[in-house]
Amino acid sequence: MLPGAPYLARGDDGELRLEGHSLRALAQRHGSPLYVYSRAAMRAALGAYQRALQGRRHLLCYAMKANSNLAVLQTFAQAGCGFDIVSGGELERVLAAGGDPARVVFSGVGKTRAEIRQALATGVRCFNIESRAELDRLNDEALALGRRAPVSLRVNPDVDAGTHPYISTGLKGNKFGIAHGDALAAYRHAASLPGLEVVGIDCHIGSQITQIEPYLDAAERVLDIVAEVEAAGIALAHIDFGGGLGITYADETPPPADRLIGALLERVDARGYGARELLFEPGRSLVGNAGVLLTEVQYLKPGAAGDASAKNFCIVDAAMNDLVRPAMYDAWMAIEPCALRDGPSAHWDIVGPVCESGDWLGRDRPLCVQPGDVLAVLSAGAYGMAMASNYNTRPRAAEILLDGERAHLVRERETVRELFAGERLIPD
Ligand SMILES: *Cc1c(COP(=O)(O)O)cnc(C)c1O
């Protein structure tokens, strides 16, 4: 079964389709590289969380750094989602997409004064604070505006999420959160500051987590801190368990969202905190398998004849600037031809035109391809376009959001002119 099924499927005619739309036809019409997302797949992914939380006081905050296209945000805002943001820029996107700032939590270790003022003026739901220094800065800014800033402290539960080191965030050695041993003192400090109002606690232990156990371990740690903090007379109205649930790229078998939430709720109930407002910050699991990146094969460069160790290169028009996950995390993402052709397959390294040896999308992939064929990199809806750059003066891809019969162009392909519009020559 393809990751992204049932929204992504190959028809009896060999054509790969997303939400019923031929991907080859979309690439012909809109050019490549092209990101294509299924709105139905996003809604279904969100639905699993919503079902599991029905009847509970809760808020789902989509971690929009995974995919921040305005139409994607609009889709989640219309479905009742809040947002987890990590910059002032993301806050502007929420507002531009019609999101409600009262459902926004502001995460991140490095909030600037300007970002804090912007978020206070907009009226976000909560600041997720990661250090004492940040508490002091937020207090200053809130007092200057005559406000009390709602705060939650991100605690570092020191559990191993069992994921890639670059996307593991809940271990002692990570830059994130306040060490659990320091949490009570930090809460006492927060409660003593007149510009702050303590409203909750949060954690986020990593990304692409495929097991339930790290979540349960983190929850136990967090609930221990809740008990300790409340015993000291500081009430915590909400508990935020962060995001991080993984998706299937290859053969991973992460728990479905409703099973993860069910297991967490059981723990939370057993500890007597079931009536609290519970927050979650899913990113990847809402959008990852809802999107693909389409790319056209430019050249085939087979390895030298007679050299068994030589590589075969399939050079495509998408590159690490369009999708950096393979280069950055050594990530494996399925690559499928949009239409099947008859013939023998060979093993190809799928590489882009960027001048870096790290510019690859997949290695040693058995494929039967010819120049002009369109390939789909699957599970590309999260941390794909959101991490795209203009390296090598490459305009960023266009984005399509499928919605039933319709295919909306939700981001135009960038032009080269736009890339250097802000640059200046100096006088002779
Ligand atoms: C990135 C991030 C998330 C979302 O992580 P996913 O793995 O995409 O679900 C949630 N909360 C915080 C604080 C984050 O930094």
Image (cartoon, rainbow, N blue to C red):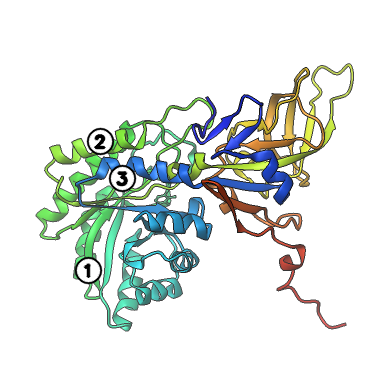
Name the foreground residue: 18 vs 359: 18
Vertical position of residue 263 compared to residue 283: above or below: above
Q: Secondary structure at mark 2?
A: helix
Alpha carbons under labels 1 and 2: distance apart: 30 Å
Estimate the x, y position of residue 318 in percent, counting from the top left: 71, 45
Is residue 330 something one can see in this rendering? no
The image quadrant of residue 110 is bottom left
Q: Secondary structure at mark 1?
A: strand
* Residue highlighted by disc 3: 50
The label nearer to you, 3 versus 2, is 3
Name the foreground residue: 127 vs 285: 285
Estimate the x, y position of residue 262 in percent, counting from the top left: 25, 36
* Residue highlighted by disc 2: 262
Vertical position of residue 370 compared to residue 104: above or below: above
Task: Report the side of 169 relative to 274 (left or right).
Answer: right
- Which residue is rendered at x = 13% and y = 40% of the image? 271
Vertical position of residue 369 compared to residue 428: above or below: above
Estimate the x, y position of residue 307 in percent, counting from the top left: 86, 18
Quadrant of the rendering where the C terminus is positioned: bottom right
Alpha carbons under labels 1 and 3: distance apart: 28 Å
| Badge number at residue 320 | none
